[in-house]
Image (cartoon, rainbow, N blue to C red):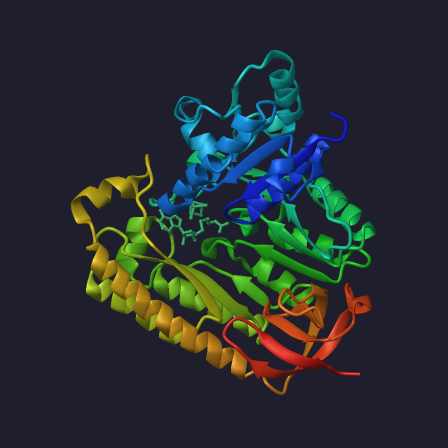
Amino acid sequence: MGTKHLYIETYGCQMNEYDSDRIKNALDAEPTDDPKKADIIIVNTCAIREKADQKAFSGLGKYKSIKANKPDVIVGISGCVAQLYGDTLLKKIPHLDFVLGTRAIPKLPEIISNIESQKRRTVETSYDLEELFEVEPYHKRGKVTAFVSVQQGCNKRCTYCIVPQVRGDEVNRPLPDILKETTNLIEKGVKEITFIGQTVNSWKENGYKFGDLIRAAGEIEDLERIRFTTSYPRDITKRMIDAMKEVPQVCHHLHLPVQSGSNKVLSNMKRTYTREWYVDTIARLKDAVPDITISTDIIIGFPGETDRDFQETMSLMREIEFESSYSFKFSPRPGTPAAEYEKEQTVDPDIASARLSELQAFQKDITEKKNLSRVGHIEEVLVEGESRNDPNFLSGRTDHNRILNFKGTKDLVGKTVQVRVTEGLLNSLRGELVK
Ligand code: SAH
Ligand code: F3S
């Protein structure tokens, strides 16, 4: 390959960020921020909602003129949209050279060299399990946080979700592999690891369960913080909660998507828990880790959602007071059961928009209130780097996963420092270093 330049554009979740870094490593190419300088351009795509899916096409559209001016540049699509539409993409997009499915990253070097030598457009969307976790991600020098994938795919069959279709069944990575990748990252200066998986806490392998994974990570020397995402409510076990309580490196924040506060909607989504079960799970978590913060995902306008169902979601929002939430309007995805329900029980888009605005306005107030309540507290912050807006400020996250900016010098990057909170804003906190 020599020193080829790679430009990669990433959409979607942590899994895609991680896969983009794996692609960088697989190709052993120099990452560049300028697509005009690239020899290989890849758009790593997300299919979770129609809007995300459309972004993939507009993303690729941008590179048409580059390819026209520089025919040797190789343009590819990877990720969930690539897996979903496969070879039809080659027909639709004439300047596209390859389509790389979600499990095919280890095959990428071969694909590229075939395109170079034979000028043959390629589609690789098979699920080759043996090589699944083979390529570790590229790690940017000096970065103190990193993801480690512990699981691919998903075995839940939420009726609205395209993930099982585009990422396949759940495959769990062996514990020794996970610990090895983690240890390698610590040696490169990483202090905080986030284990990632679609339902990360359903991880089990060779007799070990998720709680055992947390405990094993807790034994790794110099690993200061452990996070994980995304947890599936029904897979929260006593073993997991005990590990969260007893392993001091585990951060006190959990992302726990609830989707709806209505049992009828939850059942139609096939989420496998009730509202009461979810509320009780949070109570069990708070019992073990009293200061834990919870964030969530909500879908508004699921087919058949009545005003009453929506009011039940709002009452859950009031009952739990999530630290933050990501909320989306339901988007019908091809091949999912809910796309069929949609045909009969569509929620009027204006009504869905109004519900979404109401929910988001409520969340904004709660998040702001919770951020304000931190003023005066001293927080431990792992310093991640300079603040994006002002180089005189450093930025990091608190144990509870809030962004905290404060004045300080670059030598503190990678250190855990004490910061007194002076301001609570909507998306972050401000504070001052405690000497
Ligand atoms: N387990 C996954 C969930 C992936 S999808 C994870 O790693 O987070 C992330 C969120 O997108 C879901 O929690 C859900 O709230 C939302 N979502 C998924 N499918 C959707 C659809 N068809 N329409 C709207 N939102 C959807
Ligand atoms: Fe999707 Fe449900 Fe799995 S939201 S990723 S099918 S847990």
Measuring from the top left, give residue 387's x and y in whole percent: 66, 67
| Left or right placement of residue 412 versus residue 21 in this view | right
Residue 427 versus residue 219: which sits nearer the camera?
427
User: Where 152 sits versus 97, above or below?
Assistant: below
User: Where 350 sits versus 184, above or below?
Assistant: below
| Left or right placement of residue 188 versus residue 127 in this view | right
Residue 71 versus residue 219: which sits nearer the camera?
71
| Left or right placement of residue 52 versus residue 21 in this view | left
User: Where 170 sits versus 236, above or below?
Assistant: above
Where residue 211 sits, quadrant-wise, is: bottom right
Residue plotted at (50% across, 53% down)? 235
| Left or right placement of residue 252 versus residue 68 in this view | right
Residue plotted at (53% across, 77% down)? 425
User: Where 76 sits versus 375, above or below?
Assistant: above
Residue 229 visible at all? yes
Measuring from the top left, give residue 162's x and y in whole percent: 40, 40
Please, which residue is most extreme toward the front here?
69
| Quarter of the image with the N terminus in it | top right
Residue 320 versus residue 376: which sits nearer the camera?
376
Measuring from the top left, give residue 432's x and y in whole percent: 70, 82
| Quarter of the image with the C terminus in it | bottom right
Please, which residue is most extreme toward the bottom here?
376
Residue 162 visible at all? no
Measuring from the top left, give residue 272's x and y in whole percent: 38, 51
Q: Count of labels shown?
A: 0
Residue plotted at (33% across, 64% down)? 261
Please, which residue is most extreme toward the left here?
344
